[in-house]
Image (cartoon, grey):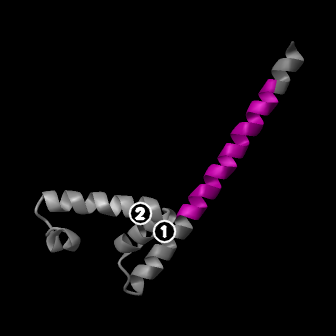
């Protein structure tokens, strides 16, 4: 039974060490991304907008169109934009 515990302990240690390495890599990548945003900002780009562009590019066209339609609907309901042109023409 002690061998079984030893094997489980070794597997557990291996998992923990892999996760720790990946967490460190994740931190390094996050720092690199932060540096790139800093570079972009120093060149005059708006980092908040860049982040939105990155998020939009992750989505497929259908998902992006659905979100835009819902956003437009909400903004119209709040009086923040006028009705859609095709609705006005009808």
Along the line of sight, which residue is nearer the eye, 61 or 53?
61
Please provide percent x and percent y for residue 39: 47, 80
| Residue 8 x %, y % | 79, 25
Front label number (2 vs 1): 2
Is residue 26 depicted above or below 42 in this figure? above
Is residue 58 left or right of 41 when viewed as pictured?
right
Q: Residues within 10 Å of mark 2 (few under 14, many from 20)?
A: some
The residue drawn where x is 50% and y is 75% is 36
Q: Which residue is mark 2?
A: 64
Q: 10 Å neighbourhood of mark 1: few (<14), some, or many (≥20)?
A: few
Under tag 1, what secondary structure?
A: helix
Q: Are marks 2 and 1 in contact (CB under 8 Å)?
A: no
Residue drawn 18% across the image and 68% down it: 87
Q: Farthest residue in the front direction?
A: 90
Magenta stretch in the rendered image: 8-30
Residue drawn at (77%, 38%) of the image = 14
- Residue that protrudes farthest toward the bottom in the picture: 43
Q: Position of residue 35 (x, y in %)?
A: 50, 73
Q: As drawn, is 54 to the left or to the right of 90? A: right
Q: Which residue is mark 1?
A: 57
Q: Determine which quarter of the picture holds residue 84.
A: bottom left
Q: Quadrant of the C terminus?
A: bottom left
Please provide percent x and percent y for residue 78: 12, 58
Residue 39 part of the magenta-drawn span: no
Q: Quadrant of residue 69?
A: bottom left
Q: Earlier in the sequence, mark 2 or mark 1?
A: 1
In this rendering, position of residue 47 left or right of residue 76:
right
Disc 2, SS: helix
Taken as a whole, is the magenta stretch helix, strand or loop?
helix
| Image quadrant in which you'd find residue 71 | bottom left
Q: Label 2 vs label 1: CA separation?
A: 9 Å
Relative to 35, say whether 2 is above or below: above
């Amino acid at each position: 039974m002690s061998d079984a515990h030893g094997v489980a302990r070794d597997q557990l240690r291996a998992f923990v060490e892999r996760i720790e390495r990946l967490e460190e890599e994740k931190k390094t990548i996050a720092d690199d991304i932060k540096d790139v945003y800093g570079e972009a900002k120093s060149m005059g780009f708006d980092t908040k907008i860049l982040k939105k562009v990155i998020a939009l590019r992750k989505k497929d066209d259908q998902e992006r169109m659905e979100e835009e339609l819902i956003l437009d609907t909400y903004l119209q309901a709040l009086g923040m934009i006028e009705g859609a042109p095709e609705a006005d023409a009808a």
